Amino acid sequence: MTKVKTRRLVLTYMFAVFMSILFLFPFLWMTTTSFKTADQVYDNPMQIIPNPFDFSPYQRLFTENNFGQYLWNTVYVTVLTLIGVILSSSVVAFGFSYFRFPKKELLFKILLGTMMLPAQVTMIPQYILFDKLGWIGSFKPLIIPTFFGGTWVIFLLRQFFDTIPREYSEAAKIDGANEWTIFTKIYLPLAKAPISTSVLFVFMWTWTDFMNPLIYLTDDKMYTLSIALQRISSGARSTDWPLMMAGSLVMALPIVILFFSAQKTFINGASMSGLKG
Amino acid sequence: MGLLFILPWILGLLIFTLYPVVASFILSFTRTGEGSAIKWVGLDNYITAFREPDFFRAILNTLILSLIGIPVAQIMSLVAALLLNVKMKFQGVFRTIFFLPSVVPAVATGLLWKWILNPRLGPINTFLDSIGLAGPGWLADPAWVKPSLIIMSFWGIGGTMVIYLAGLQNIPTEYYEAAKLDGAGSWACLKYITMPMLRPVTLFNTIMAIITSFQSFSNIIIMLDMDGGMKKAGLVYGLYIYTNAFRDFKMGYSSALAWILLAFTFVSVMLTYKFFNRSGDQEVS
């Protein structure tokens, strides 16, 4: 009996290790390619680990391909989006959680319903609207709508605010606190955990967003990393694989680092976004 | 007072969701003519769509990718979750490794896989070559475009996997203990406890995958081009809407396409729901 069990466990380990190799190999391939010269890419037989290491793809990225500017643009859009989404969503979530007003639950159902709406249905009139406002080709269409709340964050924060005992705010009220003070002094400080989960996910979504920058950014100087990389890959340098892998690595690195520093939050957030349905 | 707090969201809903939804519906019955004058054309955009070969090609491509890609990806995510649910050493390390690819940005993933699938220099064909097999042209061969896209999507199953994992951890262990006492083997446990208990999670994952799959087009632009590659083998429905709207600026026609997408998504989600409920009833009987 124990023999069968051991054999089964060994097989499980072998399977897990095999899968891990399959999952990890692309990372290895991306990293090593980014340290190769153009000639080393054509090496036959193939050398997975480059010899010697070549740092020039990274040099090319930042000198000839303006990657510093794109990196800054992405940071700019991401930081402003984070400020917009977190500020507005926490206020709205507090409104949904703390107050009683007619049709509240109906409005909240509408909020959840909008998550299901395909972007394709709203993106064309949105584009026409932003065009009339003269916003196309600026960062405004990416940033300003975020100040009106992010559905997922509102949902997440409301769920949390609902668990805060009413006694806390009742006590503060007796001491003369108004609703705004209750929000900023009691609710927000308690919500550190769900707010950091929100920051993590909004950061990831904005940093990696492809569709919105693709539609709204027309000026080469304003591209975010997603669009810049896509343009490099479809342009004259489409065969410069070390350059493209270096770019992909630079773009992925902040997220991978963030993932390793907050693994639990990431995985719990991902599994929770599933179980809410 | 409460309304004051939720006011930002209400304004956002009106300006960025409700107004666009209404406007999109109206636009779908119009065409922009000479000098950007908007002309009412009735159902013409919808009728035109059903006469366009590209419209059917886009629907067919999307359906093929979804009907094959989604079930296989669900099974793989579930297998990965079952594997990680076994008590063993380094469980956390394995979980991290399996999940990691799903946080890599779509553009980076697309370029990386384009490079891995490179017919001449990529590691897969180099490996096949070394054991005497001729590798396919992958993304450069219209017949291999869809298999390539499906294969690369497996790399990102981590997000779905953790949802299954959470579902597995919600199943009370008493059920398995009771079944074991009755002499049930692992296979019977999987079939009669795990699978039925996971049905809501599976339904949720499948529906989310359908919604995502019907809309997605970024990976096609990144890995192929705006036409969906050679012979338009990768022309998916999301891409068809995107190019009609933002390359050809046919706002009326693309709005009609968006509403057809909404209808298709709705019907598919309903069918999936029905399918899951019926297969559930059979299990009971």
Image: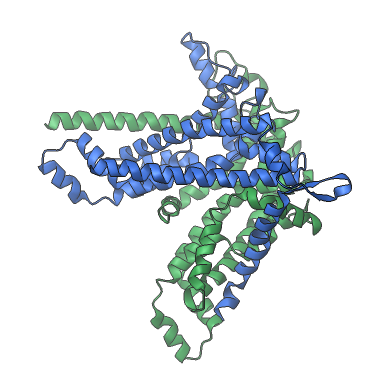
Chain colours: A green, B blue
State left or right for residue B261 relative to residue B91: right
Quadrant of res A37: top right
State left or right for residue B243 relative to residue A90: right
Tell me the quarter of the image containing the N terminus of chain B: bottom right
- B5 in relation to B56, above or below: below
Which of the pair A203/A97 is nearer the observer? Answer: A97
Which of the pair B19/B107 is nearer the observer? Answer: B19
Q: Residue furthest front?
A: B42
Give percent across and percent down for residue A11: 27, 28
- Figure label count: 0
Q: Residue at x 62, y 17 (%)?
A: A42
Give percent across and percent down for residue B162: 39, 46
State left or right for residue B40 relative to residue A78: right
Looking at the image, can residue A241 be seen? yes
Q: Residue at x 88, y 45 (%)?
A: B34
Q: Residue furthest top?
A: B132
Quadrant of res A85: bottom right
Q: Residue at x 35, y 40 (%)?
A: B81
Give percent across and percent down for residue A12: 28, 32
- A10 in relation to A192, above or below: above
Tell me the quarter of the image containing the C terminus of chain B: top left
Q: Residue at x 52, y 47 (%)?
A: B266
Looking at the image, can residue A68 be seen? no
